[in-house]
Amino acid sequence: AQKITQTQPGMFVQEKEAVTLDCTYDTSDPSYGLFWYKQPSSGEMIFLIYQGSYDQQNATEGRYSLNFQKARKSANLVISASQLGDSAMYFCAMREGPSGGYNKLIFGAGTRLAVHP
Amino acid sequence: EAQVTQNPRYLITVTGKKLTVTCSQNMNHEYMSWYRQDPGLGLRQIYYSMNVEVTDKGDVPEGYKVSRKEKRNFPLILESPSPNQTSLYFCASSLTGGRNSPLHFGNGTRLTVT
């Protein structure tokens, strides 16, 4: 079974508009971390934002925010005021388990975002 | 600048010719890992290391070797590359292997084996 599901293979948005990229996850462990990464066409993998399962507040980093709905097991990425440079592949990922020890990072299949001028 | 540095960025080689992809991080991270990324298969973990001299297999370790003799370095060795190892490779590190520790990735190595 897929641990991380990103149902939108591709999305487009107009420049300066906000966009939400969906992510749902599957775990029975109460302790986990959720991450979003950006992969531009140049290929590098850039860490954007982190949300812990016990965090009470939604995470924010500049124009990125994470809409964390624990009961629904969703962790959607919201990009506000889209810019042309936001065009990229976006991956949702999860690490589950205790904070000590080893927890593998599991990735979703990704969503390709295109920002139109 | 805090970063993960992997080299080379691009590599074209022939079947059977041993190669090493280097990876170094300057953040004093305990945990390091190698991934490969292939169309339709996503990102798959090859090997990981929890600390110096501690390495373990990921999901797709066959055909690869690693070593962790120093905390900062985690090279990936292909003793006898084959065409099915053509892929985009990423080295990554995090402060710990724990759930709240983001992985930071290098810029990737595009390997082509002919």
Image (spheres, coloured by chain):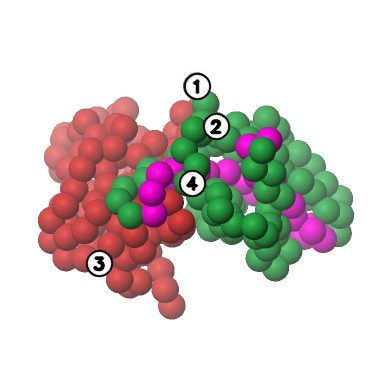
Q: Which chain is red?
A: B
Query: Which quadrant holds residue B44?
Result: top left
Residues at discs 4 and 2 both on one chain? yes
CB within 8 Å, label 3 to label 2: no
Q: Tell me the element at label 1.
A: loop
The quarter of the picture where the C terminus of chain B appears is top left
Whether marks 1 and 2 lie on the same chain: yes
Q: Is residue A41 above or below residue B41?
A: below
Where does residue A19 sit, x and y in percent of width and height?
A: 79, 49
Q: Secondary structure at mark 3?
A: loop
Whether discs 3 and 4 lie on one chain: the answer is no
Name the residue carrying label 1: A1
State the residue position of label 2: A26
Q: Residue most toward the bottom?
A: B1
Label 4, on which residue?
A: A32
Determine which residue is flagged by label 3. Answer: B72
Indicate the chain coloured green by its letter: A
Q: Residue at x 58, y 43 (%)?
A: A92
Mark in the foreground, 4 or 1: 4
Residue type, label 4? Tyr
At x 14%, y 40%, the residue is B79
Residue B61 at x, y percent in the picture: 24, 34
Question: Which residue is painted at 60% across and 31% down in the image?
Answer: A5
- What chain is tagged by disc 3? B
